[in-house]
Amino acid sequence: MNKSILITGANAGIGKETARQLALIEETELIYLACRNLEKAEIAKKELIEITGRDIFKIIVLDISKPDNVKQAVLQLYEPIDAVIMNAGGTGGKTPEKLTKDGVTELTASNLLGHVVLLDELILQNKLNNVALFASSEASRGIERVGIKRPDLKDNSVDEFVSIFDGSKFKGNFDAYQIYGWIKYGGTLWMSNMARKHPNIKFISMSPGGTRGTNGMNDLPFLKRIFLKHIGMKLIMPLMGMSHSVEKGAKRFVEGINNPKFKSGIFYASKEKVLTGQVIDQNSIWKDLGNHKFQNNADIAIHKFI
Ligand SMILES: NC(=O)c1ccc[n+]([C@@H]2O[C@H](COP(=O)([O-])OP(=O)(O)OC[C@H]3O[C@@H](n4cnc5c(N)ncnc54)[C@H](OP(=O)(O)O)[C@@H]3O)[C@@H](O)[C@H]2O)c1
């Protein structure tokens, strides 16, 4: 069982609900809420203490899109943690295509680059004991019913991944709603490569599934947001097995780190064509994910920006 856990993006949505569920497990002794906004983090911490009756939350101020900030945050950990849940992310804010000073798009920085730095630093400083979980998404294999296409890579080379991470592949046609899946795909391959490099730690990619009631779609263009968040997710998608509650989404993360049935290097998400229900090894429906060369290329490519 994991006694100390760090969660990125823990002040809202699935991250906050994951913190709540973990605090209700008796063996959990310490939860780091790694959030970019201190005020929001303090409000979340207060609420979590009230709902769970447990004063086991510590705030770490951390903007995951800023690698220097991430390194500072890891230095603030005086004891190793048992588990890290790399949950922060989404569709990349108001300017997802904009390049950061590290040369990646803000979409890549907030979902992936910062988590790569976080994991590298934790491992380098011997501060991670058991398990790392990356919040991936079914979008990385495409979600036909909501118009998200499967990432269509030419050869999965290092250069191609670099062009995905810095946005140059999408030349003037940057639709974050679509490209989000490509970034989660790259992150999922990176995690599987980490599993082969560090057999003493468990690396799980897990999708929370189609989870309603979070802020995840707030930055999408107006019409897409209104349709998906307020009509699709609430009314139509539950009937089609395409959306579930935030409790169910977060439960996947809690089980992902605590249940020994989940194996290192695997991406777990919903069965084909749905976004809810039982999770399965995605390699059974998409063989690319198990390709060691592709995994290695994604890992090398993201490290070119560090
Ligand atoms: N909801 C779904 O259906 C779904 C499906 C598949 C995968 N996911 C993934 O699950 C994760 C959580 O999603 P959600 O729906 O709970 O989203 P959410 O409600 O928008 O919450 C995202 C959290 O991440 C934080 N965050 C974003 N950028 C950050 C940064 N640069 N540094 C630090 N924290 C940052 C946000 O902080 P602020 O409050 O400061 O913005 C917030 O706490 C995401 O990685 C998402 O891609 C969600």
Image (tube, rainbow, N blue to C red):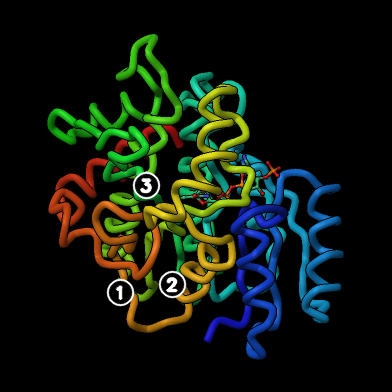
- Residue at the outermost bottom position: 26
Q: Who comes first in sequence, dot 1 or dot 3?
A: 3
Badge 3: residue crowd in 10 Å (few <14, some 14–19, many ≥20): many
Q: Residue at x 46, y 68 (%)?
A: 252
Q: Residue at x 18, y 36 (%)?
A: 156
The answer to whether marks 1 and 2 mark residues whose Cβ atoms lie closer than 8 Å is: no
Mark 2 residue CB less than 8 A from any atom of ligand 1? no
Q: Residue at x 52, y 32 (%)?
A: 227
Between the C-alphas of marks 1 and 3, the distance is 17 Å
The answer to whether marks 2 and 3 mark residues whose Cβ atoms lie closer than 8 Å is: no
Image coordinates for residue 57, horizontal then vertical, percent: 77, 70
Q: Who comes first in sequence, dot 1 or dot 2?
A: 2
Element type at mark 2: helix
In this rendering, the label closer to the viewer, 1 or 2? 2
Q: Residue at x 69, y 71 (%)?
A: 20
| Closest to the observer, 95 or 138 | 138
Q: From the viewer's perspective, is 42 left or right of 167? A: right
**Residue 147 vertical placement versus 103 (above, below):** below
Image coordinates for residue 237, horizontal then vertical, percent: 44, 49
What's the mark number on residue 187? 3
**Residue 240 vertical placement versus 305 (above, below):** below
Q: Quadrant of residue 19?
A: bottom right
Q: Quadrant of residue 179?
A: top left
Between the C-alphas of marks 2 and 3, the distance is 17 Å
Going by the numbered disc 2, the residue's amino acid type is: Gly
Q: From the viewer's perspective, is 50 left or right of 11? A: right
Going by the numbered disc 1, the residue's amino acid type is: Lys
What's the mark number on residue 256? 2
